[in-house]
Image (spheres, rainbow, N blue to C red):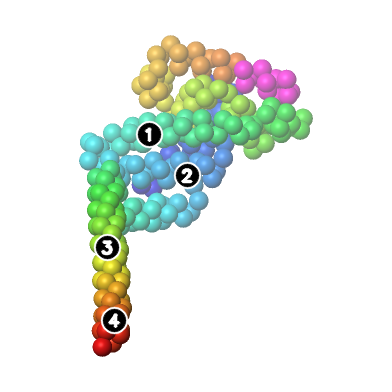
Amino acid sequence: MDWLEQELREALNRKDPAPDFAERVRWNLRVQEHRPAHGLQFWLATAAAFVIVAGAGGMGYRQHQGEVARQQVMQAFRIAGSNLNHIQAQVREVRR
Amino acid sequence: MRAHQSMVFSLAYHFLHDRESAEEVAQEVFLSLHRNLGAIQSPAHAGFWLRKVTVQRAFDEGRRRKRRPQVALEDIVEPAASVERGDPLLGETLRRLVATLADAPRMVMILRYQEDLDPMEIAELLDMPVATVKSHLQRSLALLRGKLERRGLGER
């Protein structure tokens, strides 16, 4: 081995990482272990749940809107019926 | 882990010439080891596995950093004429010169002089023919020798 190879061996000797390196690795391991595995199945299930909830919500909203419309029509009928009764009463008054 | 951390960190550090990136690579390697503990058959296999994965991660990080400016020859510290062999300044100059080599020869040099691996072991780690490893070693040494001589640090 010549002098350059000897110098290279000294220049490229092993060096230590920061003193807290091992502790940071252990901390990252703990974080990974406590993190739920969000694989493809998790995201597919999440997407499916979202579609179901959104669909049910949409259906519920449409049902609610239908109920409001039905009540408005009934109210209109009641008002129309009341007006009709009033008119009929007036007609009867006139005929007497 | 402590038994291997300086090996893993130093491979990444000498290849990337950046402490922060080297620590990130080393962290990834040990997290990956933890995920693959079932595949490790013996302490010797663990050492081989760590070297191989560190080399791959260092290459990946090197490719990611390609867009960033690398160490240019003109940035290399010009040692004073009084620099002697074994001087820390010569060591830093050598590390910077190694950092200017292309990826494959740089890793070959690091595995040879940091890890003291022979060309056969380096060829196995890098999936490269032994003849290519030897060629990288010879060319890199000649290149470094030439650059050092131009700086007045050749064989005296």
Badge 2 amino acid: Glu
Dots 1 and 4 on the same chain: no
What residue is disc 3 on?
A66
Estimate the spatial distance between the alpha carbons at disc 1 and disc 4, rounded to whole Å.
100 Å
* Stretch in magenta: B143-156
Q: Which sits earlier in the primary sequence, circle 1 or circle 2?
A: 2
Is B111 placed left or right of A68 in the picture? right
Badge 3 amino acid: Gly
Circle 1 chain: B
Estimate the spatial distance between the alpha carbons at disc 2 and disc 3, rounded to whole Å.
59 Å
Secondary structure state at the residue bearing disc 4: helix
Is B18 placed left or right of B24 in the picture? right
Q: Residue at x 27, y 72 (%)?
A: A77
> Mark on residue B24?
2
Badge 1 amino acid: Val
Secondary structure state at the residue bearing disc 3: helix
Viewer-side label of 2, 3: 3
Q: Residue at x 45, y 51 (%)?
A: A21
Badge 4 amino acid: Val
Residue B149 sits inside the magenta stretch: yes
Q: Which sits earlier in the primary sequence, circle 3 or circle 4?
A: 3
As displayed, is residue A91 above or below residue B153? below
The answer to whether residue A89 is seen in the rendering is: no
Local crowd size for mark 2, using a 10 Å CA cut-off: few (<14), some (14–19), many (≥20)? some
Local crowd size for mark 3, using a 10 Å CA cut-off: few (<14), some (14–19), many (≥20)? few
Do callouts 1 and 2 mark residues in contact (Cβ within 8 Å)?
no
The C terminus of chain A sits in image quarter:
bottom left
What residue is disc 4 on?
A91
> Mark on residue B53?
1
Estimate the spatial distance between the alpha carbons at disc 3 and disc 4, rounded to whole Å.
37 Å
Estimate the spatial distance between the alpha carbons at disc 1 and disc 3, rounded to whole Å.
63 Å
